[in-house]
Image (cartoon, helix red, strand yellow):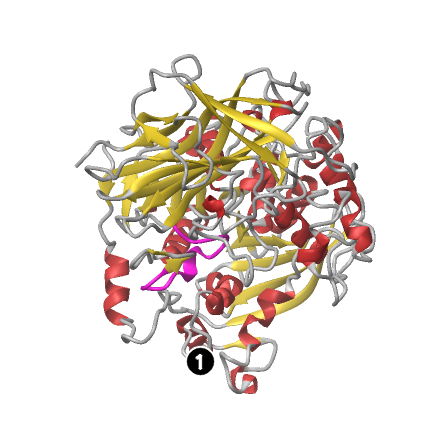
Amino acid sequence: MKTQRFPLPATIAVLAISFLPSATKAEPLPMPSPEHGVRVERGVEVEMRDGVKLRMDVYWPDVVQANLPVVLIRTPYNKDEYYQAWQLESLLADASEVGGDVKLDRDALAKLFAGDHLADRSVRGYRWMRYLAAYLFASRGHAVVVQDTRGRYTSEGTWHVQGGDIPDGYDTIEWLSSRDWSNGNVGMFGCSYRGDTQIFAAKSRHPNLKAIIPQASGSTIGGAGDRYHYFGIWKNGVLELSSALEWMLRNGPSRTVRPPADTDRFDLVETLPVIDMLDRAGHPPTDWPNMVARPLTDNWWRQFGYMTDYDRFDVPALFINSWWDFGALETLQQFNQFRSNAVSDVARDNQFMVMGPSGHCYSEMMPDSYTIGERPLGDPRFDYWTLYLDWFDHWLKGDDNGVTDNPRLRYFLMGRNEWREADGWPVYESQPMNWYLSSEGNANSSAGDGRLVVRAPAKSGADGFTYDPADPVRTEGGFQSGFDRRNMPAGPFDQSAVERRDDVLVYTSDPLDRGIDIVGPVSAVLYVSSSARDTDFTVKLVEVFPDGKALTIQEGITRMRFRDGYDHETLMNPGQTYEAHVELGATATHVPAGHALRVEISSSNFPRFARNLNTGGDNYRDTTWVSADNSVHHGPRHASRLVLRVLPAD
């Protein structure tokens, strides 16, 4: 089936008419109306196979409690986030009017779901929606369980990042499906780490796990596809430093300790060695030393159950993610692997995915006039909540509601700002397209002579720059998650300042005669050399507007010591030319006629990625570095190029 424009579903059309915002508001679609009131039973204990007790809250629909389907949310971030969502002062002026802290009637829930009392109507202001999910599913006839994971908040045990998630998930499902009030069908829901727990549960293949909705779950991809992308903090062999540091500062300690109030992330991230960063912040012990310094193929990683190529799955899954999430490509790989490695026809035929244009875990919160970074996207709203309810109603209640007739993949095409549909990923009719690097030997900065052309240049050449770890190229937007989002937000931002640096090679196409739809994975093949034994090469794909604004489309990095695989490191011979493959990620972006494509190449993107110290030593324990004279070669023998997939022209 060819890719099609995705028409506005009837459910969205009705909601858009019924809840049309005023010209001064930018609002997401409201949550569907409740059918029941909800009461909460707090602190229920479940004993794991090793005797450790995990605690959870159960959200009961205010109906006869028998034969109930179960929705499980496992979180390391405190189960009380969900319980307390209804208590927000900005939502309800007088909490006592809705029954105190035990029960909310249907009218009170309707107010919450509509956001009638919401003061902050920004995208971040709507983050409460993710926590009201427990009330929503319960109000529609599910028993919803929100559980603190092992060693977190009210649960017993020792906390390690993703430690015990496979057996604990299995044991919890076993307990829930065997209760006399349960119909035996369990689903799972949640974003980020909460999505990761669903992938781990799916690996264990409990027969009563009937459906999952993993959102932004790419952190669990592990070694599958030779990615070695653990916990979302490794990309092509390089530590995603800013995201990893922020997450560990907030969540790394064995108990619920917050970082010292005077911790300055921007000062801390500049220091060396990387392995001691949290110690210098005065933090209690964490998994940080192991997570940043263990070799990617070390057996230490295997204890956590990250995905491999050999995993088999047997559960229908509705994957949810966004183009500006750091793990978008990894989630698409999961979507494919759940399909290809399914052990039953039911699982194989019921893998679905929705890819929107937001940042990490904000899919449902996009308003009718949405801008991410500096890119306006029109009205990207999608009726996620109705889809979620239909999904669980079908798989957990047995409702024949047509949810499995949906397209396998629905994605938002940025630039055209419309939803499309396809049968799979990569979109089948997309075709590879190469853009080659060319210059007269001076591609340094946007003032240089670097060009991006559709045919390999007949003349050989090279462009060089010096990478000094003491003065790295700075991150400007992009795909980092966490850190200080107010001062270092994710998304597409103007790269003009970055492109003025002499240690950034810039290759720009002529303005396009006609627009192109870039839909698929983005990569680059570079022929490079260096004066160092090891160094990094970064690649950024940029859209150049007629006024000169240059917005990021995708970006990536590769560490040269891993060019032959992560299972053995091979240092470079100074001056020798090597072929390097750089994976940039995935996108669905329309670049219109009159705009140009641009490729930026350097050796750092800091602090998103940890600096390579260029010595060939240990980048995470060492404190000394050397500068590297790096070169990118192009021409008939060394066809350095950007590799895209594009849809046929309209």
Which residue position is annotated with label 1? Answer: 117
Q: Nearer the viewer, residue 195 or 61?
A: 195
> Which type of secondary structure does the marked residue at label 1 adopt?
loop
Residue 136 sits above or below residue 424 on the image: below
* In the image: residue 138, left or right of residue 411: right
Q: Which amino acid does label 1 sit on?
A: His
Name the residue located 40 percent from the left edge and 68 percent from the top edge. 35
The percent coordinates of residue 28 (x first, y second) are 37, 65
Name the residue located 74 percent from the left edge and 67 percent from the top edge. 261
Say whether residue 620 is magenta. no
**Crowding near pointer 1: few (<14 within 10 Å), some, many (20+)?**
some
Q: Which of 493 and 250 is in front in this view?
A: 493
Q: Quadrant of the C terminus?
A: top left
Name the residue located 35 percent from the left edge and 69 percent from the top edge. 26
Q: Nearer the viewer, residue 73 or 220?
A: 220
Residue sitting at the far top? 637
Q: Quadrant of the N terminus?
A: top left
Label the magenta part by its dominant secondary structure.
Answer: loop
The percent coordinates of residue 322 (x first, y second) are 43, 48
The percent coordinates of residue 410 (x first, y second) are 33, 43
Residue 522 sits above or below residue 7 on the image: above
Q: Is residue 624 shown to the viewer in this render?
A: yes
Quadrant housing residue 507: top left
* In the image: residue 555, left or right of residue 627: left
Task: Provide the residue span drawn in magenta.
Answer: 356-370
Residue 458 sits above or below residue 318 on the image: above
Q: Nearer the viewer, residue 302 or 62?
A: 302
Residue 217 sits above or below residue 538 on the image: below
The percent coordinates of residue 321 (x first, y second) are 45, 47
Q: Is residue 55 shown to the viewer in this render?
A: no
Say whether residue 367 is magenta. yes
